[in-house]
Amino acid sequence: MIELTEVSKAFNQGQPNECRALRHVSLTLERGGITVFKGPSGSGKTTLLTLVGCLARPTAGRITLDGRLLSNLPERFLTEVRRHTFGFVFQQFNLIRGLTVLDNVMLPAYPLGQPHWELVNAARILLDRFGLTAKATSRVEWLSGGEAQRTALARALINDPAVLIADEPTANLDSALSREVLALLGELATQGRTVFISSHDPLVFEAAHVNRIVELHDGQIAGDCRC
Amino acid sequence: MLITPAIVALQGIALSVAGTVLLASGFAGRILRRWDIHSGSELQLRMERQTYLISTLIGFALGAELLSLLLFVHTAESLSSQFVGAMCATGVLNVNAFGFPTLLLKIAVFFLAALWLLLNRVDNRGYDYPLVRVKYGLLMVIAPLAVAEGVVQTSYFLGLTPEVITSCCGSLFSSESKGVAAELAGLPPWPTLVLFYAAVLLIAAAGVAFLRWLGLGPLFATLSLLGFAVAIAAIIAFLSLYVYENPNHHCPFCLLKVGYDYVGYALYLPLFAAAAMGLSAGVIAPFRRIASLQAVIPGEVRRLTALALVGFGLFYALATWLVLRSNLILLG
């Protein structure tokens, strides 16, 4: 369970262009299912997910994971939590150009130091699961949008995280591909993973597998609906 | 004032260390007053982020401070040819009233800096900043000493004028003189020798017991410092006599000369390192009950204790060898 207490996040704090992306957000996120964070651009969805996923630290407030305080952990401990608990799918996919699909998928697991053959096997299983076996040795810049998104999903799962965080996963996809990605995310949720999605795409928050929709507006929670 | 690369380096280190710890002591004061790990306030989170940067900067500054003690002694020794009457570092430190106070301050800061660096190392391995108040509290103790060292050392170097006729070690470390040095030089060899070896037996016994029972930390820390003091006294009282093969030459600095194969460095380096690690191990051990350090401290303390014992062992082995190989018959 992830709990946010009075969490605020400011960028350029103390500068004339200070931006308060989140203001006193308190929220409890249970394990399992799909939770969608919806809201217009600038509402704080992505910021909230980066805080939950330990990619950034709050300016004020506390975040706990299963009762353990996350938001004040020194970086070396935070890295461990991030690596083992969270998988990330970014809006722009953030695949490393020049590397193959297989290499991109294996990349987040390198710091863990498991044997290379084991890593290759795990990556190939994921590629097979997402229908990318034939593309394993292709460079990622040659992939279509749907293939790139599925590669990003496979990469997010290489460390077998309990929580998958997807930031606007359908933003660069057409409706058919969006439904395909949502079906994959739904499948992951039914297998017991927790999935957090930020989106302002109606296709996402109307999807069948969504359990909860949290609405954000101007950095504050504007609605919380359990489906 | 003499200007040599070493003096410029020493001044650079002393002033930057003093400046760094002085600036950091403002932050340390805020930590001591306002730190609350359970709070999610902006101030608390800002302090949590700032402590990374400030601890890193202090770590570099105090690391340089450790090296500066060695450089200071080496510089004092190397300048001995520049002053009339100076035969070794003693004469150079005696050129004005600030030489020996600088050395003593540097030794005090050396031990506190070593302790701070090891506390910081342990603190960084706990997930909830377990020793943050302790290490910044210690910084508040180091800050005035580091500033005093900067001021006294600057006064010392500013007063280093080649026309000064100084006095050599023979007059300072002589049983006929007055002062602490003369008192140490006048210690009777036999009782000092017995005390010298009794100290190492005590340290070894306490160290071995401390490896098993970590509750003996304060005892081992105290014995490490006492052992250091006894070793310095023994060097002045009798060990130096064996090295120089001269029953009246008690100087602890001439040991650093090429004529004696720089044997002083081989004696002092393990001695200072051992005392610093023994002190730190004993001070750190009581924090082993903190939940986030329970898995860290036993290993760290045992490693430091073992290293301290090795350091004392090296010092005593070399000292014993120097006595045995000497042609001087002091104790019949």
Image (spheres, grey):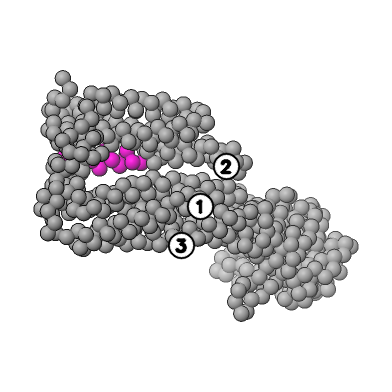
Query: N-terminal of the two: label 1 or label 3?
Result: 3
Where are the magenta residues, as a range?
B260-273
Q: Give the percent coordinates (x, y) of residue B216.
A: 49, 30
Identify the residue under disc 1. Answer: B136
Is residue A173 rendered to the left or right of residue B135?
A: right
| B165 drawn magenta | no
Predominant SS of the magenta segment: helix
Disc 2 vs disc 3: Cβ atoms closer than 8 Å? no
Q: Give the percent coordinates (x, y) of residue B197.
A: 30, 25
Q: Give the percent coordinates (x, y) of residue B92.
A: 18, 51
Disc 1 vs disc 3: Cβ atoms closer than 8 Å? no
Alpha-carbon distance for marks 1 and 3?
A: 12 Å
- State the residue in front, A192 or B179: B179
Chain to which mark 3 belongs: B
> Which residue shows up at 37% across the image and 61% down it?
B16
Identify the residue under disc 2. Answer: B293
Identify the residue under disc 3. Answer: B23
Q: Quadrant of residue B272?
A: top left
Considering the image in quadrants, where does the N terminus of chain B appear?
A: bottom left
Confirm whether circles 1 and 3 share one chain.
yes
> Which residue shows up at 17% across the image and 22% down it?
B331
Local SS, label 1 = helix
As shown in the figure, which amino acid type bears the numbered disc 3? Leu
- State the residue in front, B302 or B226: B226
Q: Quadrant of residue B231?
A: top left
